[in-house]
Image: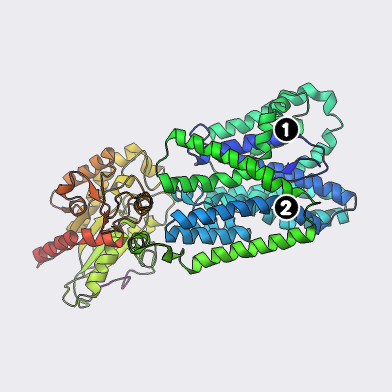
Amino acid sequence: MTKSGNGILPTSAPLGYRPEIDGLRAIAIIPVILDHAGFSIAPGGYLGVDVFFVISGFLITSILHRHISEGRMSFLTFYERRARRILPALFVVLVFSLIVGWLIMLPEDFRNFGQSVFATNVFLSNVFFARETGYFDSESALKPLLHTWSLSVEEQFYLVFPVIMVAIYAIRPRLAPFILAILFAVSIAVAQYGSIYFPQINFFSPFSRAWELLAGALAAYVHIERVRISARHQACLGALSLLALSAIVLAYLLFDEDTPNPSLLTLIPVMGAVGVILFAIPGTLAHRLLSNRWVVLVGLTSYSAYLWHQPLFVFARLWFGAIPTLGWVGLIVLTLSLAWLSWKYVEAPFRDTAWLRQRTIFALAATGICLFAAAGLGLHITRGAWWRLDAQGQLLAAGQIDISPMRDSCGNVLPDTFDDYCIIGAAAPASPIVAYLGDSHGKEMFWRLSEKLKHDPGSTYRVQPFLWNACLPFASIETPGDSCNVFHARARDYILANPDIKIVVIGAAWQGHLDCEGSRTGRAALADCAFLDGAAKKMAEEIELYRQAGKKVIVVGPFPSMPWDVPRELQARRLHGQAWTDLAQRPVIDREAMARFRTLESLVPDVRFYQPAAALCPAAQEGACRVSIDARPLYFDSNHISGHGADLALPGLMAAIDQELAAIK
């Protein structure tokens, strides 16, 4: 039995064993693991997956070409081989992940994990994660099955690719490379377009990734001809193979999470992988490097290593919180050790056709898929098996979902008109309106304020939100390429023209927006220091516009930011038996951003500034701020206050509003 494989997914094929391809797998998997562990040595390490796609396309196309040409193509046999290679190790990792998740994950996290288990088992996890989060978002580091998106892309591709190949060979086999080249060109055009206009969907889309698999497929046809000439051109091929290997390594070193991917730039590592496959013949330096026994061993276990690393890393983060460098080294060693055990005792036995027949493999595959899909669906229905936790644990878990139900219905929406848009309160229709301008940091405050006004028949004013995530709430400060620019311009004009709006409350994630090194918006223009140095003046001028229109303005200062996700940190402390129910923590303070905020404060000396830190960080805490009270988190992540946290901060804001209204009267 030979030992070649198909990218991330090992397989057996009568191609003659090529150890350098296993070596290329090692060159792909190690940077992926290092990148996901947070090591900066290879910021483009995620491109290892692109290399895997090329290997997969090459080997599967080689198999299909041979089987179709020899008249022994069988779709049942093809998918049997896929099931033998993919599912056994995947099922083992899923069992492990479900057990550990049950023990340590909060219900909302476990519910989301269950959804991903379901999506993974029906090979739609790329679709699931494209809808849920970006690959490089901070939350992605806490999703145990995020990496399975690439398995889903491959399986979606291989649902149709064998059919296309059989159809081409039935018409005219010589057309195959030309048709594949056309599909390659179409796919890479889609990828380049998507990298500009819808990068998150583009990253996970099989239509944007197909060209990488097709690059390997085209390499299979070139390889057939190359075999005849390779011996006579060994020196040239040696240079080309080293150049190709260097292209892959340079991409790992020079690309980062901001590099569009997949895009035309991704041609560098993809063509590098193609070059290694084609030119690294025996006798070349690249072949010797990649054929080293230890490198080959890592390559042979690369599929299992790929499966194990992400859940291990996620569960370690949830259990330990911050992990030192030595800890990450230990996790990588553990990953490679489990990969070897999984390869030897799970993958290899299931590849043995004499041990398990085709019918048995299909029966086991169907049973496993159904069971895991049912488990995932069950976790979704039961909201992450909420009953696992005791009473205090359930209070903690509730904090993770203690968020405004109006986050999207009364935020991130550009209505046709702001007349009657989310105006809430029991006061009379002619009563004053308080406009709440802000980003996501204002949504829980608006929610809790609107709830109080809605149920208080004695209230004297109503509230109306003008909230848009990740954007400073000023029309004079544009965020390139974002709809919030139009929203804030229209909101400003509406507020200025509406005589019923008496007070304008302005709040935002000031530390995130005003830090030129790490602007929370992630937009280049807002992360430019020179631009931000002048932002305070622009904000002050816009505040003055409201005041000239007869509006009172209240600026809500920053909410203290914590160094970790609060509910998850409290859960870790609860599991470790540490104090957590009434916890205080020193906040993360961005002094540069706060200096800019104080500049704004100095430019509008007659404007009232309300500091929620006064409620969240009492003097008795000596510089620390509350993060939980009676087992209830005051934040639902590291920097957004929960509804409970808003209840604590709200009285001060309501007092400020009452004072400003009294001054108007």
Main secondary-structure element of the magenta-colored stretch: loop
Q: Give how far across and how far down residue 366 sits, in percent.
A: 69, 63
Q: Give how far across and how far down residue 49 sits, in percent.
A: 61, 43
Q: Nearer the viewer, residue 555 or 479?
A: 555
Query: Is residue 409 among what the camera can see?
Result: yes
Tell me which residue sits at (67%, 64%) in the image.
367
Q: Nearer the viewer, mark 1 or mark 2?
A: 2
Q: Earlier in the sequence, mark 1 or mark 2?
A: 1
Identified by mark 2, the residue type is Arg
Q: Which residues are magenta?
A: 418-425
Q: Nearer the viewer, residue 14 or 435?
A: 14
Identified by mark 1, the residue type is Glu
Tell me which residue sits at (81%, 47%) in the image.
63
Q: Is residue 554 magenta?
A: no
* Residue linked to disc 2: 84
Q: Is residue 312 left or right of residue 209?
A: left
- Picture quadrant where residue 371 is located: bottom right
Q: Residue furthest top?
A: 235
Q: Is residue 423 magenta?
A: yes
Element type at marker 1?
helix
Query: Is residue 271 among what the camera can see?
Result: no
Q: Callout 1 environment at 10 Å: few (<14), some (14 to 19), or many (20+)?
A: many
* Residue linked to disc 1: 20
